[in-house]
Amino acid sequence: MDKRYHKPYKKRRAKKRFFWKLVKWGLGLGLLMFILLTIWIASIAKDLPDPEKLSERSLGQTTKIYDRTGETLLFEIFNEKKRTLVALEDIPEYAVNATLAVEDKNFYNHKGVAYKSIARAAISNLLGKKSGQGGASTLTQQLIKNAIVGDDHSYIRKIKEAILATQLEKKYTKKEILQLYFNEIPYGSTNYGIEAASQSYFAKKVEDISIAEAATLAALPQAPTRYLNNLTRLQDRRDFILDLMVEQQFITEQESKTAKNVDVELKQNVDNSIRAPHFVMMIKEQLSQTLGEKLVETGGLKITTSLDYDLQEIAEEEIKKGVEHNREHNKAENAALVAIDVKTAEIRAMVGSRDFFDKEYDGQFNVALAPRQPGSSFKPLVYVAGFEKGYTPKTILYDAKTAFSNAIGKPYEPNNYDFKERGPVTIRKAIQGSLNIPAVKMIYLAGISHVLDVAEKIGYTTLSDRSRFGLSLVLGGGEVTLLEHTTAYATFAREGAYIAPVSILKVEDDDGTVLFEHEKKRGKKAIDKNAVRQLSNILSDNNARAYAFGLNSVAQLGERPVAAKTGTTNDYRDGWLMGYTPSFAAGVWAGNNNNTPMRQGSGGSTAAGPIWQAFMLRALEGTEIEQFEPPEEPKTNKPVLTGQDPGLQEVEIDTVSGKLATEFTPEETKEKKKFFAGHSILYHIDKNDPQGKPPKNPESDAQFASWEKGIQEWAKKTDEELEKEPIEISEPPTEYDDIHKPEFTPSISILEPTKKQTVNRIMTARVQASAPQGIKRVRYFVDGVQVGEVFSGEEYAATLNLGQFVSGFHTFEARAYDVDFNVKSQSFTINLTGQSDTPTVLWNYPPANVTITQNDFPFTFEFRPTMPSRINKVTLYIKKKGGELLETIIFDGDFSSNMTHTWENIPEEGGFYEFSFIASYDGNQTTTSQTLPLFVSK
């Protein structure tokens, strides 16, 4: 043999021997595991009860639910079972089929256990998937679980269940198993078996129930407490079962449609001794899901909850009083409240409706757990998401009507609640004024996906279908529950640390063994701490809220700092007030269970707010007043993020050149003017990195064009409305006045009168004046009051009448102007003698050109008439400099002493205002006083 082939052959033989060794070891190990598994299963099976002895079982013990002290009994779950046996023949076929359709469609094809379904569920569990886990238990297994082995959530229980189900299938026919099932299975409360359930919920025998009622009963066994506590949820499951019945050809499409048109209405007898009923029913449902319905109903458990019964009573009282008021004034028949201890996340109070026992208004429906649109109370979540991204409370957003572009359909055009536009506003002002347009801009800037990420982190479960949501989410376009909404606000109070709401503190069995005890948690960081501090700082700023809601709104608690936000849906179907202190959070909803609107104008402030405020004041009475931690000031040098509006600018220009005024520009040609060349925030920042570099091409943003258009249209409307002080919609000038320069300044020398000269009432004035561009005019002044003007002539001589001035020393001034109002002046003191032959009015206070502020109002002037015996009437004129007359005030009577006038009305605009008098004397003669100029600062 060729040696080249010898070594590869030996290697192949060695590999073959190794393979067969592995096979032998694998078979041996598999056989050993099978033997051990068989022995283990046999050891389990030897102690199993006899499945034939279904009637020989313990009745169990009563479960009791307590408040947080473990002393106040809230509810006792009685174990007296109601069971009325019924023959399978007396159960309508469609009732049997409804159960088979939803619980076990392959009932007639298996032998007690659906191994494929079990394998599928096991694989899903291993993979951590939620889908694919259902449907593993057959109808036979469910019968065994409920009648014999109980609800223990373990694999041993599953094995026991499977063994007994197989045994039961061998001993009974399918018909007998069905009869056992329909007489044994729990349908909620104390109803066991379909006949007892039918009589309890529909007041009729099972043989008389309709298809709709049959599907309703079939919906209950999976989670009786869950569905009995929420009829809307029950009706959804009923309709799902009707669809399955059509799919499996048990009923026709028309029969399903007819059944779906019937509302679910159950006749439930409620124990009137129950306390905090909505909270108790929620506890019962939670326990049923974790421990199983059977253990909760018959296990003799002692449940200690988180409820503070003193606070619960306060909550119930305030809900009752608030609804009585709302019925009359707001057309709102219901309200709900949730209160949470911020430090522990424990639910301290829960009121799900005004009256749990009121069947007419579906009192058992727990609104605190029902999804409702939150209106503007969702805005804080959006803004805090924006703060995380780098936006600040001082960020400028334009409150201007905007058609937000949509990829599909018409543009989205939200309005503010009062249909007004306020132009550039800070985020602080936008939040506290509950302005809608800036809020929609904020959710776009923060990113809908980021907002939903934050919502998910702080416990919202109703917003999982992200495809449903657009920009309207910020205005309450996504439903939330009051419990989860209050939990979110408690997270804000906890500075962004999320703790799931806690309702059960301890569960003990009938022997006192602790089955469960809640361990307090520190909370998981869900939102940036400083972002939440910024939010709390705004929501607790009562002064910032005052411009929209006043200082004494229902969103404040007097001297106790509280962060609060109202919410009202556009159609007035829901009103909310959500708020928190550093240690306590509460939320209130008001509206109608049937979703009908409240009275127009009713909402968070009027329907929910008074309830919230009254509850919080009583709940926090006697507790320590706490302060919110102040936020760190965001570090940024971007004007649009620091409260500076880069669009609106006021500059001083020269009216001759149209350019920016300089130190050489004459006062006569200076004018303050507002220019608007505003852009949306998208022009200044990259929305995904607001603190970073500005965008190179802002026009590429999908919303840029519509935001810019909205701002320009707002500016145009504002300009048309502001006739007294218009805004020029253009860029302000950037060049400086180049007409008024030192080299163009005229020269002037007063020839007559001379310094300190004594002059008469009629005097002559002359000057020597020249200028590089020629002299255009010369003006003469006494104490700042113009008394003459000359345009030409030798030495610009003028005869001046000084009859309106009193005797004594006065300042005489002459000013020479060229064609461009370049000016030069000279002044000195003169002594005026002789008696004036013309009465006038002189100003005592204030001096000319003084500046006054809004805080100086009401502002009082003082003046005195000369020659009072000759004056008949004095008229005061107030006008904006260069503008129209604002006020005319007439004085008559005694003019012998100093007189005053108080200026009451604060001007809407700042700037120079002029005050002058016309005095009527000697019957029909008049004289005009000197004009008093004042500057009003805004």
Image (cartoon, rainbow, N blue to C red):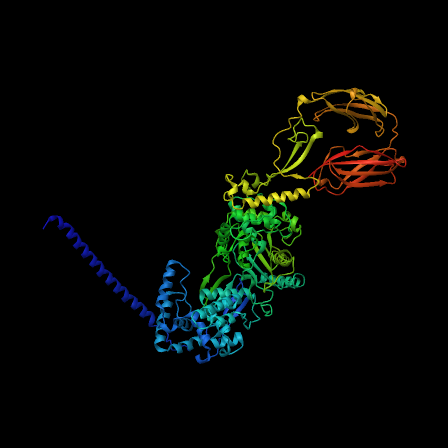
Vertical comparison of 841 with 799: above or below: below
Vertical comparison of 376 with 177: above or below: above
Left or right position of 603 against 242: right
Please name whichever residue, 543 or 831, is drawn nearer the observer in this view of the structure: 831
Q: Position of residue 533 (x, y in %)?
A: 55, 47
Q: Position of residue 865 (x, y in %)?
A: 85, 35
Vertical comparison of 197 with 29: above or below: below
Quadrant assignment, res 760: top right
Q: Which residue appears at 81% of the width and 36% of the height?
A: 917
Name the quarter where the C terminus is drawn.
top right
Please name whichever residue, 701 or 387, is drawn nearer the observer in this view of the structure: 701
Quick check: can you spot residue 844?
Answer: yes
Quadrant assignment, res 485: bottom right
Vertical comparison of 169 with 602: above or below: below
Q: Position of residue 139 (x, y in %)?
A: 40, 72
Q: Which residue appears at 37% of the width and 70% of the height?
A: 161
